Image (tube, rainbow, N blue to C red):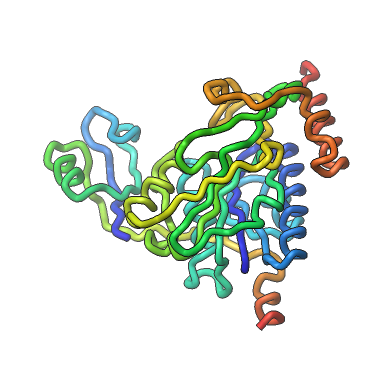
Amino acid sequence: MSLWFCVPANGRLELTAICLRQLRRTCDRLTDAGTQATAVVIACDENLDTARQLGFGTIERDNRFLSRRFNDGIQLALDPAHNPRPADHVVPCGSDDWVHPSLFDQLPGDDQMIGFQNMCFVREDGLEVTARRISYPGGCGIRIYPRSLMATLGYRPADEDRVRGCDTSILYNLRRANPAMRIVELAPDPWKIVDWKTRGEQVTPYDHVGQHPPLWQGDPFDQLDGHWDAGLLGEMRVHYQRDMVPA
Amino acid sequence: MTHGLYLVCGTRAYRGHQPGTVFVGRLDPLAEQRAIDRGSIELLERITPTLPELVSLPAGWITDKESNG
């Protein structure tokens, strides 16, 4: 079995570098456990250098349409015309996310996708984390898709011209093309998916998660301690502390 | 997959695209024809979206394939 993460990235170099280092650890853990895992980063800035240093694939693409970047990553991961060893599964993933390897203990069958209902969000100032249950069909955060489903849309499942709502576009188009597709929703411990919000431009601000039922909240570095690598958590704490210092 | 390269005509945005801009989309055929007929968009060409030129596979991905058979 093999699995690729597809990670569009834009700016936020330090935060993205920390998140990509965590993704490297997740890939290595999965590979050690028998699932060959790696990632491709789609960007047009120094994030590509970080990706190369970590051994990930890269695609240089402008940031005009986020959906096109996801399509690029998915196509490189799965399309035998571009990848001599296409992956069995693909996971679109944010450049500000941490995803735990145990989320991939179960992988979807050919007519399934797996979504996750629980995840947590760190506030833009790094002083609070909140765990939420997201009741959208297919959950939120990340989703796992098999190659078979993506093949029905030429490995480019999202509308090419979207700047947001890419995960919804992928799911909508796949359901339309594959009426028998089954959505498997899992409810992992919410700390297993962490969305690190930052100040400035982002697709979904922290305030927007308030509509979903809270599971718990607290100091992010207390709540996540023991679940994630202490060194990377320390780097993230320093990143937020530095970001809080007035210019 | 059949996609189009479209030019937004006239003075109104189309699907969030501003007049004078070009975009790639996969439109429902009837919706496409209506938009063309009323002058909202112009179909410049049929295209198949694909990867850009600057692409690299992850380190060792092909080597791993060879070693794993």
> Is residue A150 left or right of A212 when viewed as pictured?
left
Please tell me whether residue A141 is drawn above or below residue A26 in the rendered image.
above
Q: Residue furthest top?
A: A246
Q: Position of residue B64 (x, y in %)?
A: 70, 75
> In which quadrant of the rendered image does the N terminus of chain A lie?
bottom right
Q: Position of residue A103 (x, y in %)?
A: 66, 50
Nearest the eye: B46 or A204: A204
Please tell me whether residue A41 is drawn above or below residue A245 in the rendered image.
below
Nearest the eye: A11 or A149: A149
Q: Quadrant of residue A192?
A: top right
In the image, what residue occupies the spot 64% across and 55% down?
A: A104
> In which quadrant of the rendered image does the C terminus of chain A lie?
top right
Nearest the eye: A137 or A174: A137
> Is residue B28 left or right of A237 when viewed as pictured?
left
Q: Position of residue A63 (x, y in %)?
A: 52, 42
> Is residue A233 left or right of A182 when viewed as pictured?
right
In the image, what residue occupies the spot 30% across and 55% down?
A: B3
In the image, what residue occupies the spot 74% across and 44% down?
A: A17
Q: Residue furthest left?
A: B37
Numbered marks: total: 0
In the image, what residue occupies the spot 75% across and 22% down?
A: A218
Q: Position of residue A35 (x, y in %)?
A: 68, 65
